[in-house]
Amino acid sequence: MTAPDIAAAVTVLRSGGLVAFPTETVYGLGADASNPEAVRAIYRVKGRPADHPLIVHVASAAAVPRWAAAVPPAAAALAEACWPGPLTLLLPRRADVDATVAGGRDTIGLRVPAHPLALQLLGAFDGGIAAPSANHFGRVSPTTAAHVRADLGDEVNLILDGGPCTIGVESSIVDVTVEPPALLRPGGIPLEALEAIVGGPVHTDDGGVSRAPGMLASHYAPVARVELVEDASEARRRVEQLRTLGERAELLDPGPDPDLYARHLYSWLRAADDGGVTTLVAVPPPAVGLGWAVRDRLRKAAAPR
């Protein structure tokens, strides 16, 4: 990506437009987080409920006091260990930060992404970029620039292409306004690692609908119906059964490597839709490491819509 591309993206953001850009997790749909009208454009383009908070991406931990009213010790430890990286911290929102970006709540999600292009953009913009995933609300997140184009097309003013995302599932979201901290969304930093960093338990908590991104029961969903079957042999039998009933069923069982599963999950879900699959029978990965995040995404993709 060249300097003129970054300069053009900064110009779009400063004029209130939308820029899609890569992170190590998924592609984000970015707007100037300090511009309420630009932030409302994100909600409009995505079809996102106005009470569903956004994540503000910043260039470094030094920017946190611009957005957060306080930084608890657990937040400082997590930021030091995980940023730049796939971790979002839910912090108390400063009173002078417009509530639009926070879905009207008194907390705000902050993250320093690890993708070099995202960091270049944030450094050049010198401000916070509000950025949920660059797709229509509730659907499969994008992990390539082509996915963004297919989903949003001309509704995005500029797309920065940084290649495929390396992690492939969204950031972990940790609420550090409570003690002990609460994991609201499993993601790129596994629970085991978070607990090691804070030196104690990190509770898992659904937190209530819309407390943080990705917390609805149904989310990350392809058009195809998704069924989860833990046993691979049983899953293969289920596919054959569905095919005898006239369904276009396929098996998703990439093996026990949760990192591989996470990296390609959203591409595989999109490929199922592109191929006209009506039911995707998925074997979840083991519940370790990134497996927690993949299992969460599969469970929400399979939930009633």
Image (spheres, rainbow, N blue to C red):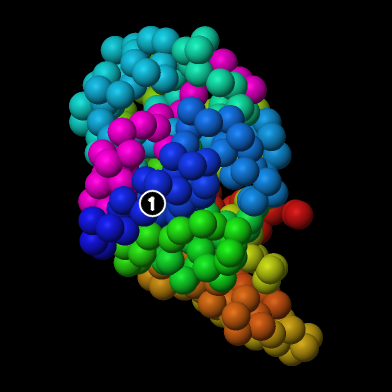
The x and y percentages for residue 113 are: 31, 42
> Could you tell me which quadrant the C terminus lies in?
bottom right
What residue is rendered at 64% in x and 22% in y?
Answer: 104
What residue is rendered at 56% in x and 21% in y?
Answer: 98
Among the 4 quarters of the image, the one containing residue 200: top left
Closest to the observer, 130 or 226: 130
What residue is rendered at 62% in x and 76% in y?
Answer: 273
The x and y percentages for residue 33 are: 48, 32
- Using the rendered image of the protein, determine whether residue 305 is visible from the camera's viewpoint: yes
Q: Which residues are magenta?
A: 104-129
What residue is rendered at 27% in x and 41% in y?
Answer: 124
Q: Please, which residue is most extreme toward the right here?
A: 245
Among the 4 quarters of the image, the one containing residue 189: top left
In reply to whether residue 123 is colored magenta, the answer given is yes
In reply to whether residue 287 is colored magenta, the answer given is no
Among the 4 quarters of the image, the one containing residue 53: top right
The x and y percentages for residue 10 are: 37, 46
Residue 107, compared with residue 3, is above or below; it is above
How many tags in the picture?
A: 1
- Using the rendered image of the protein, determine whether residue 301 is visible from the camera's viewpoint: no
Disc 1 residue crowd, few under 14, some 14–19, many 20+, Cα 10 Å: many
Determine the secondary structure under disc 1.
Answer: helix
Q: Amino acid at mark 1?
A: Ala
> Could you tell me which quadrant the N terminus lies in?
bottom left
Closest to the observer, 201 or 304: 304
Which residue is the site of mark 1? 9
